[in-house]
Image (tube, rainbow, N blue to C red):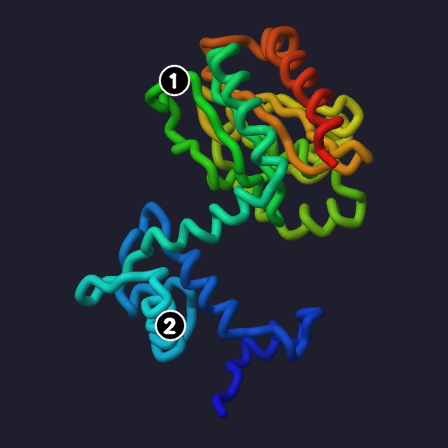
Amino acid sequence: MSRIIPRDAEARKNNPVGRDFSEALARGLLILSAFDADHPAMTLSDLARKVDLPRATVRRALLTLLHLGYIADEGRLFRLQPRVLQLAATYLQSNLISTLIQPVCERLARTLNTTCSMAVLDRTEAVMITYASARRTQPFGITEHIGLRLPAYCSAVGRVLLANLDSEQLDATLSAIDMEKITEHTITDRKKLEKILLSTREKQYTLVDQEVEIGFRSIAVPLFRRDGTPVAALNIGIRLEQASKEQMESDYLPHLQKEADTLRMQLL
C-alpha cells in the first residue's frame, strides 16, 4: 500500500471529509486544470513541476485520464481532449440560471451594443457562465468567454458577489485573496475594498473602472432567487469611449436592474 505524501496527509487532516477524501481524484482534477492558454500541451516533467507532484504520481493520473479520453498523448506531449467539455456542459445544461439568463445577455448585448455576462462566485474568483457580445470581434485584451475567471476583488461581477456574502464568509474569502495590483487603478487596500463592498451591498450594484484592464469599465447587479438568496451577478462591459461612468449609471444600470427584477420571479 502506497504511503500518503506529507502534503496530502495534511490536506486530508484539514479536510472535513477526513479519510473519505480521495487524493487520487483531487490529483486528477489538479492535472486537468493545469492546462491553460499558456500551457496547451505539456510533457510529464512539465506537468509534474507545474502541479508540484512526483513524476510517478502524475504518470498514473495521466494514464488514467488518457484511458478515459480526457487527455491525448502526442509523442512526449499531453493535451486536453474535447471530452473535458462534457464536465462543463453537464453543469451548464443542468443549471437553470444559465439557461434562463443566456437569452437575457444576448438581448442586452444587442440593445446596448455592449458585452453582457453573468457570473457566479468560485472561492476567490468570479466565473462567467453566460456571455454575449454585440461585436463579432473582441476589442479587449482579455479573451471573454464562458468559463472566463476574473479576480473577485477588482471586477464588477466579483464585487457584487462578494458584497452579498455574510460577514463570516466575506472575511474568510478576503483573507484568502492575494490582492495583486493588476493595473494602476486596481484597489488592493483591504479596508478600502471593504468600504466599497459595504456600499455595493447597500446600493445593490457596483461600477469598476479600469481595475482589471486599462480602457475597460463595467457595471454589475446581483441576481437573487425569489426567496432573496443571492445566486449570481449580471454585468455589462464597455470601452471607455462608449460611455462615461455617469452614463453607465444613468443609461445602462436601469436595464440591468429591470432584468434582475424580472429574473428574480423566475429563479426558484
Residue 135, numbered circle: 1
Q: Residue at x 59, y 79 (%)?
A: 9
Measured Cα–Cα span from mark 1 to mark 2: 41 Å
Side (left or right) of 110 relative to 118: left
Mark 1 belongs to which amino acid?
Answer: Arg
- State whether residue 17 is above or below residue 256: below
Q: Which x, y percent locates residue 200?
A: 73, 27
Q: Nearer the viewer, residue 253 or 84?
A: 84
Q: How many numbered badges does the structure rendering display?
A: 2
Residue 215 sits in quarter: top left
Residue 163, numbered circle: none
- State whether residue 206 is above or below residue 23: above
Q: Badges 1 and 2: C-beta atoms under 8 Å apart? A: no
- Camera-near label (1 vs 2) is 2
Label 2 element class: helix
Q: Nearer the viewer, residue 111 or 50?
A: 111
Using the rendered image of the protein, determine whether residue 188 is visible from the camera's viewpoint: no
Q: Which x, y percent locates residue 231?
A: 69, 38
Mark 2 belongs to which amino acid?
Answer: Thr
Label 1 element class: loop
- State whether residue 9 is above or below residue 75: below
Q: Which x, y percent locates residue 254?
A: 67, 12
Residue 229 sits in quarter: top right
Structural crowding at the residue carrying mark 1, measured as other residues with C-alpha within 10 Å and reported as few (<14), some (14–19) or many (≥20) = few
